[in-house]
């Protein structure tokens, strides 16, 4: 991710300024990188719009639905907007870690140490190539976490407890979950304020969704934890496929309360970006994928704001 370069035009877009203002503030015409964003924000007085702190979990018990591609790009985009973001990689495959330009195997400690040995979260948090985006990396050490959690007291609440106080240092904590059904994901659900469920527009996604909604209902009943917001986002959508259009219609019928209007279209740039260890915004900010994630984020932030206002007015 250290290799991410910005044009003056892109920086200007991000900050709502003109390329001339960007070049003037930085005193050069090219060679811009992520480090320039906070400097520009300061010089051009472009503080991000204040936002109530969130812990946002990307989860689906099914694999390959885009949890990692979407969550890592989403976290990066929040950081571009000027928010202080912590990405936590929960998956032993360490793909979110890779998408943010780090190699999971190179870290001695992960969330495993936090949840099992109560090592403070800040001790396992690392910086990324984007100044206000930090990362809790994952590697194979995470693969035994469910077993290790099993005999422990308060085993469902360990992540939530670890984030307490710490979350105040960040505007957003973004969690990328593994596609498994166990104690780690239960911890993630208990810690989250918002759940984002990436699904593919196929009918197999239905079984996963049903199981997930049953689990959430169980949490409400047994652990009295209520997620504040749930969003379903259709990923890798290709509208030339009849089956995809039918599956989307079925989702609209059965999950209209949760389904986002924005869909993320099929876009090969996701795979290319991740192989470069870079979120899609750093790889090709003009791609369909980047545009769609940006729109998803706008929609999510807008919906949360409206829900909070409605709750405050009620
Ligand atoms: N919108 C998309 N269009 C095309 N390919 C995608 C899209 N989103 C994700 N992918 C690809 O699908 C595969 C699975 O995505 P990933 O984010 O790893 O899913 P998960 O984390 O749910 O297992 C990856 O190869 C990724 O590059
Ligand atoms: Mg993943």
Image (cartoon, rainbow, N blue to C red):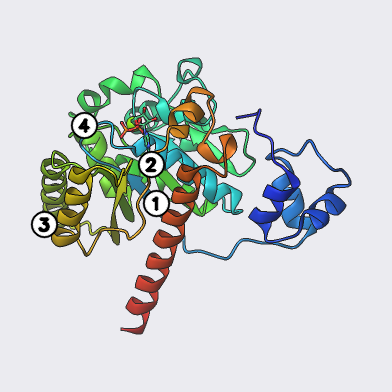
Q: Nearer the viewer, mark 2 or mark 3?
A: 2
Give the mark nearer the N terminus: 2 vs 3. Answer: 2
Give the mark nearer the N terminus: 1 vs 4. Answer: 1
| Circles 2 and 3: CB atoms closer than 8 Å | no
In this figure, which residue is indicated by the disc labeled 4? Answer: 180
In the rendered structure, find residue 55 and report the number of the disc placed on it: 1
- Secondary structure at numbered mark 3: helix
- Secondary structure at numbered mark 1: strand
Q: Foreground residue, 81 or 135? A: 81
In the rendered structure, find residue 175 and report the number of the disc placed on it: 2
User: Is 156 on the left or on the right of 159, as rendered?
Assistant: left
In this figure, which residue is indicated by the disc labeled 3? Answer: 221
Give the mark nearer the N terminus: 1 vs 2. Answer: 1
Which quadrant is the N terminus positioned in? Answer: top right
Q: Is residue 13 above or below residue 98?
A: below
Cα distance between the residues tagged 1 and 4? 20 Å
């Amino acid at each position: 991710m250290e290799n991410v370069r910005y044009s003056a035009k892109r920086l200007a877009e991000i900050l709502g300024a003109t390329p001339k203002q960007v070049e003037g503030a930085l005193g050069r015409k090219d060679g811009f990188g992520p480090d320039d964003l906070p400097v520009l924000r300061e010089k051009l007085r472009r503080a991000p719009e204040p936002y109530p702190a969130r812990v946002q979990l990307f989860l689906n018990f099914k694999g390959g639905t885009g949890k990692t591609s979407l969550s890592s790009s989403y976290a990066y985009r929040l950081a571009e907007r000027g928010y202080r973001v912590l990405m936590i990689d929960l998956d032993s495959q360490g793909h979110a870690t890779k998408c943010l330009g780090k190699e999971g195997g190179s870290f001695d400690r992960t969330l495993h140490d936090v949840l099992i040995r109560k090592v403070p979260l800040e001790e396992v948090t690392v910086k990324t190539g984007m100044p206000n985006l930090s990362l809790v990396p994952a590697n194979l050490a995470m693969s035994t976490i469910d077993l290790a959690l099993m005999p422990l007291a308060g085993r469902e609440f360990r992540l939530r407890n670890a984030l307490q106080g710490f979350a105040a240092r960040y505007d957003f904590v973004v969690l990328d979950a593994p596609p498994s059904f166990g104690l780690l994901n239960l911890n993630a659900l208990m810690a989250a304020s918002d759940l984002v469920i990436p699904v593919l527009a196929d009918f197999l996604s239905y079984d996963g969704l049903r199981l997930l909604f049953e689990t959430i209902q169980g949490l409400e009943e047994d652990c009295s934890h209520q997620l504040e917001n749930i969003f379903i986002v259709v990923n890798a959508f290709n509208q030339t496929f009849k089956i995809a259009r039918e599956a989307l219609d079925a989702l609209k019928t059965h999950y209209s309360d949760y389904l986002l209007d924005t869909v993320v279209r099929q876009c090969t740039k996701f795979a290319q970006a991740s192989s470069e260890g870079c979120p899609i915004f750093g790889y090709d900010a003009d791609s369909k994928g980047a545009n769609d994630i940006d729109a998803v984020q706008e929609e999510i932030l807008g919906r949360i704001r409206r829900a909070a206002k409605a709750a405050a007015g009620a």
